[in-house]
Image: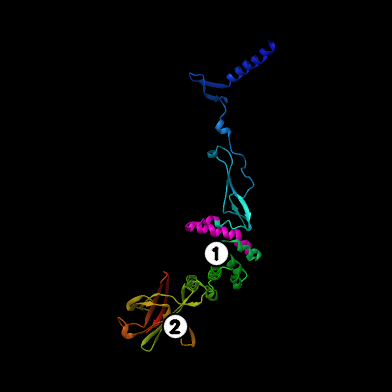
Amino acid sequence: MKAEIVPLMAVLVALVIVSGCLSTGTDLTGKVTDVQVDTGPDSDASQARKCPATCSDGNPCTTDFCSEQTDFECNNIPLTGKACGDNSVCNQGVCEERVDNCSFIYGGGIMTSSAEEELERCYEESFYKSAVKSVDTAICDVIVIPEYLGMCYAAVAYDIDAMAVCDEPQDASSRDECYLGFAGAYAKKYVFMGEACDEIVDTGRRKECMALKDKVYEAVGVKEFYAAIVGDRIHSYLVLKDMKGRTTAADGSLTVYIKQTDVKGEEEKRLFSSTLDVKKEDFRLTPLKGFGEEDIAFVIGPIYATDFEELPSENFGTFYVTFYTSTGRAFFASEELRF
């Protein structure tokens, strides 16, 4: 009998101790309906809990974080499409090498502009940079989307200045993209590679490539403006320049304004004004200032005295021109005249 009493007493003592720490309630059936831990008057359970110093799992292909919203527990979310090293990209939380996981972002659906940017960034970080660094186009060959395969080859071709690299892809569309990318890279430095455009088979892509010429030679200002009285007329011309200071031409309109000025340059009256529509074809090889030199220029006029609204009553005048390009640029120039 004594052997059975000891365990019973131990249970009773344990219950007494627990009753000092737990507050329980029961329903009419005697079941426990609530249990609260008495942490003492000076403690706060919510403040005592916090995230660990780090949640990093050492995997570059997971997003690691912890917050109150995660109940102070670490979460490691697997990633897809993120570059995780040279020629490596994340696939469902796993860093894989030499596999075109960037194409997973494409998903076969309609591409938005943000998705295209993300996809191109993935290819650049995972393939283009390492292919250029090692001058190894074999790194490009695992890319499954022809457009980006061609762009990878173009990156190498441009870096070593060898357009022939674009002949290497087996797929015709990839070769076209390579030539287009090669020409586009040079266009950013205002160099037009028309020979690359000539190699493109697809008509639309070739047209897109040839359009780079307009961007390369886009007018950005006036290279030279000249106006002088020759006999009974005013001879004048305008030469435009591109970003590199080269002579160029542009579609647009030209406003011509001649005013009479006094010796101080102040306007006395308007003598002539006109607005002309201008096409690139209107810029032609023209003798400059009568010294035998020639350049591509737009010849204004000639303007005769009979074209004036009023005849000048003083000896001084100013010839103003403003050229407005079809792309929204405006260039201004003037020349003093002595009647």
Mark 2 is on which residue type? Arg
> Residue at image x 56%, y 30%?
45
Q: Position of residue 36 (x, y in %)?
A: 54, 25
Q: Residue furthest top?
A: 1
Q: Secondary structure at mark 2?
A: strand
For the point 62% across and 18% down, which residue is it?
Answer: 14
Instruction: Please report the residue visible at 54 percent of the width from the left and 76 percent of the height from the top.
Output: 195
Circle 1: residue type: Pro
Image-based side of 18 in relation to 239, left or right:
right
**In this rendering, is residue 178 above or below 270?**
above
- The residue tagged 1 is 146
In the rendered image, is residue 263 in sight? Answer: no
The answer to which quarter of the image holds residue 172 is bottom right
Q: Residue furthest bottom?
A: 231
Classify mark 1: helix, strand or loop.
helix
Q: Which residue is mark 2?
A: 284
| Residue 26 numbered mark, or none | none
**Boundaries of the magenta span:** 104-132
Where is residue 136 shown, x and y percent of the image?
65, 65
Per the model, the C-alpha gap separating discs 2 and 1 is 42 Å
Could you tell me residue 213's position as x and y percent? 49, 74
Magenta region includes residue 108: yes
Q: Pointer 2: residues within 10 angstroms few (<14), some, or many (20+)? A: some
In this picture, residue 301 sits left or right of residue 73: left
User: Which of the pair 299/311 is nearer the observer?
Assistant: 299
